[in-house]
Image (cartoon, helix red, strand yellow):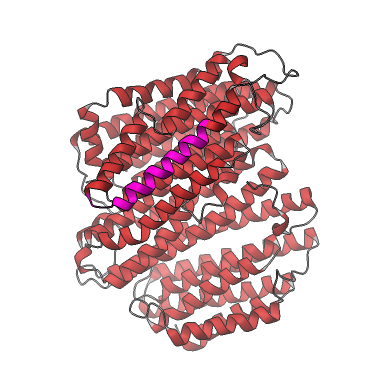
Amino acid sequence: MILAVILLLVPLLTLALAASQPTIAQLTRRAAVLAWAHLALATVVAVPRLLAGGAPEPDGVCRLDSLAAWFLLLTLIVVAAALTHAVGFFDRELAGPHPPTPRAVRQYYGFTALFCASMCLVCCADNLGLLWISIEATTVCSAPLVYYHRSRTSLEATWKYLIICSVGIAFAFFGTALLFAASQQVGALPEGSLSVAVLADHAALLPVRLLRLGFLFVLLGYGTKAGLYPLHTWLPDAHSEAPAPASAMLSGALLNCALIGLWRAASILQAAGQQRFVAMTLLPLALATVVAASLMLLRQHDLKRMLAYSSMENVGIMATAIALFDGQGLALQALCHSLAKVALFLLAGNVLQDYGTKALDRVRGLAQRRPREALLLALAVAAVAGTPLFGNFLAEWHILSQAADTGHALVVVVLSLALAVAFVALAIHLAGLLLGEPPADLDPPAHDASRWLVPTALLAGLVALGVALSPGLLAIAQGVGQ
Amino acid sequence: MSETMAAFLVLTGLWMVGLTNLRTKLVVYGVQTLALDAAAVSIGWQHGELALIVVGLVSALLKGLAVPTYLLHLTRHIGCRRDEGLFIAPPLLLLLTVGVLSALLLLRPMHDALRVADLPALALLLIGMILMISRRMAVSQIIGFLVLENGIFYYTIAQPRSMPLLVELGVLLELLAVAMLAGLLAFRINDRFEHIDVTALDSLRD
């Protein structure tokens, strides 16, 4: 109960703020402060749980276990970073050639608040029904964020996002209903149960066929939301059309939420001794996602679509970790990918505001025009591609070695090849972006610390994770899988 | 759930597959949903489950009346009356769908997990999918999605125990939100493109 109040109070304040007709400058600044207050509150609740490990007694609704605490903090870090950067972002938007209406910005913040609240619920939900409702709520609340630019292309992206994800998630509800039906066939649970904890406790008694069928539909549903190949078609559109802070939240927080849904369902199957079934169904999808995404990365013409495909590739890696029941790998990979991708999407938003385009063949000479941001962009791309020195390398190494230890040699080979292809693709596109002569018709660059402050902080965090990933943090991540 | 009711629901679903007139289709959808909700209420009455009665009534109000009325208003406002379908003409599609459903009945896939009583749910699920992928107009896609949801609702009420009340109400609320949002977007698509043919939304690609 206290947990729910903490989780929902701050977003409600932000919503009230957005509705109370402030000026845009006031709104963006206060929302950023509120986001940090939210993170501080969540830290008070979540950090003791992470340090102690384990999980509290289930009450059938919400349950703050280690996984929930980890992803709750990660989600709120992403939201706080995005909203902090949004202060400068909206200042520049208002000064730019196509300023948004105050109404559009207020709507944006209102839906961001609801979006953040629903993501917090996803992290903490123990009830499969609540999990489903909150994941569907993330779709409904983030679709208006994608529509922010009010253009033809953003309309197209929003429509596809809403319809494809809603249909996908409808299948997840069918899967949830199947799991509920399975629980009714257990003598000890005459009323049936939707609680993940209760289902896992009684997993050995659940009818296997129904359990497997339920998992398949949940996989289909939450897999669509996570962007697993071939259900990913909405992902590059939505991520590239949304404004930078929203893209950062979609990629850095929302994809994790879908993966949490998959992990919860998989953990029930694991408790029932069906690890092989999960691996047989999820692993091929995960590998196909990594391979398809890295091949699509090669032929990109759009900066933000390129980043979206890179997210898809990382989702594939995280889904591999889920299929191998490697909670530590999942937690580390999600953390490092989110930090790097948020930095990247925020920097890409700067580029779009600066050059007025995100077409890769028209953005040239960033190194000459804005050396500091060019350096940050290069470092962030290196991080997301899994180069040593950054935490991403350790996380990916962890998952690869886990796959090798459990005898999945093919997984290791396919992942390594795909990662190499993705690295090359990203490097080629990045070189084109940084080198060359900037177009002559651009205004001279103005110095503005709000452009690079948040990305710098995120990258510093990633380097800290990579160079000094402390045994303490590793132990905490270890606890996430249990 | 009586056999007559199950047959009625599947047949109204099939009827929608064969229809090209959007208004008629919306009315048929409304009738189907109201019938399903009536079944939910009667099952709730027989089993003494208050939750199911409440869900049935709320669903009748929202999914059976509010959503079709809203979508009817939308079609009238946009002036979009017909949806001739994509690739396959609706009458032929109807035949194909009947074939698929017969195969479903004869082959009984997943028969060790799903009972015979669950098959109409699977049929409605399939019909919803077919409605979604076979039509051009935004409204048709929304209807397909709603029929698919009817299939899932059928499955939940055909079980010995229905889902907890709060979960069912939450799901209904989400469905309402999706339908309303999709309707709003359809209005915007009409303003921007002067049609609601969503197959023409193809400018975003790699």
Judged left or right of residue A7, residue A107 is right
Q: Nearer the viewer, residue A145 or A407?
A: A407
> Where residue A257 sits: x, y (%)?
41, 45
- Which residue corresponds to the image point at 60% horizontal and 43% vertical from the top-left? A144
- Magenta stretch: includes residue A339: no
- Which region is colored magenta? A406-427
Q: Is residue A46 at all visible to an observer of this figure? A: yes
Q: Nearer the viewer, residue A70 or B34?
A: A70
Q: Which residue sits at x=52%, y=24%?
A: A85
Above or below: residue B40 compared with residue B201: below
Q: Residue at x 56, y 22 (%)?
A: A87
Q: Is A14 placed above or below B173 here?
A: above
Q: Quadrant of the N terminus of chain B?
A: bottom left
Tell me which secondary structure the magenta stretch mostly adopts: helix
- Residue A351 lies in what quarter of the image? top right
What x and y, as percent, mark residue B180? Answer: 62, 55
Q: Say left or right for A99 vs A411.
A: right
Report whether residue A17 is seen: no
Q: Nearer the viewer, residue A74 or A392?
A: A392
Above or below for B81 versus A481: below
Q: Is residue A263 above or below residue B136?
A: above
Residue B39 in picture, x, y percent from top left: 49, 78
A52 horizontally vs A323: left or right = left
Q: Is A407 colored magenta in this rendering? A: yes
Kindly indicate the quadrant of the structure image that contains residue A371. Answer: top right
